[in-house]
Structure formats: C-alpha cells, structure tokens
Image: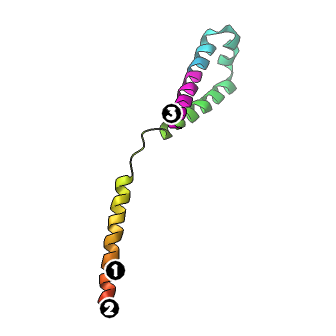
C-alpha cells in the first residue's frame, strides 16, 4: 500500500511538471498561460500535492513510547497498591 502511494505521488508530480511544460511549449495550451483561473486551479493542485508529500514522509516509530508508557503505568499501579495496603 505504501508503495502504491509513492507511485501515485510521483505520477501526480510528473503530471504537474508536464502541465507546466505544456503551457509554455505547446501552442494548443498557450491560452492557459494567460488565464488566471487556470493558474488558481494549478496552485490548488500544487498545494494538495505538497500536502501529500508532507504527510507521506518518514513515520517515526512510537513503539518505544508505548513501552515507556506501559512501564510507567505498571509503576503507578504498584505505588497505588502499596498506598492502599497501608490504608493511606
């Protein structure tokens, strides 16, 4: 699944680059270079693409955090047992 997401991100990036190249070099797409609506849509597309790249970054392992939280919970449980044992 992660590999499919990477492929999609690369495909969308290539599509953005091809769109820009098409606007500047293909005569059929030349009117789009003067249309502000086309630039707004392209800007929104690029922002979404940047968001996809940002959330698809390296994920940090939270396994150590879980172990630490489990140890802290066990210590707290033991302390509560001791406290209840002495009737405090």
Measured Cα–Cα span from mark 1 to mark 2: 11 Å
Q: Which mark is residue 3?
A: 3
Q: In the image, residue 6 lies at what x, y percent?
A: 51, 32
Measured Cα–Cα span from mark 3 to mark 1: 47 Å
State the SS at label 2.
loop
- Front residue of 29/57: it is 57
Q: Which mark is residue 35?
A: none
Q: Is residue 84 above or below residue 42?
A: below
Q: Quadrant of residue 7?
A: top right
Residue at label 2?
87
- Identify which residue is drawn at 35% across, 75% down: 77
Name the main secondary structure of what is drawn in magenta.
Answer: helix
Q: In the image, residue 85 lies at what x, y percent?
A: 31, 88
Residue at label 1?
80
Q: Is residue 72 above or below residue 8?
A: below
Q: Earlier in the sequence, mark 3 or mark 2?
A: 3
Which one is closest to the eye, mark 3 or mark 1?
A: 3
* Numbered circles on residues, count: 3
Q: Residues within 10 Å of mark 2 (few under 14, many from 20)?
A: few
Specify the segment rendered in magenta.
1-16
């Amino acid at each position: 699944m992660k590999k499919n997401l990477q492929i999609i991100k690369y495909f969308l990036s290539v599509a953005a680059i091809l769109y820009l190249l098409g606007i500047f070099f293909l005569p059929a797409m030349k009117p789009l270079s003067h249309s502000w609506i086309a630039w707004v849509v392209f800007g929104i597309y690029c922002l979404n693409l940047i968001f996809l790249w940002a959330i698809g970054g390296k994920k940090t392992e939270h396994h150590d955090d879980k172990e630490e939280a489990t140890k802290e919970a066990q210590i707290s449980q033991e302390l509560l047992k001791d406290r209840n044992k002495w009737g405090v």
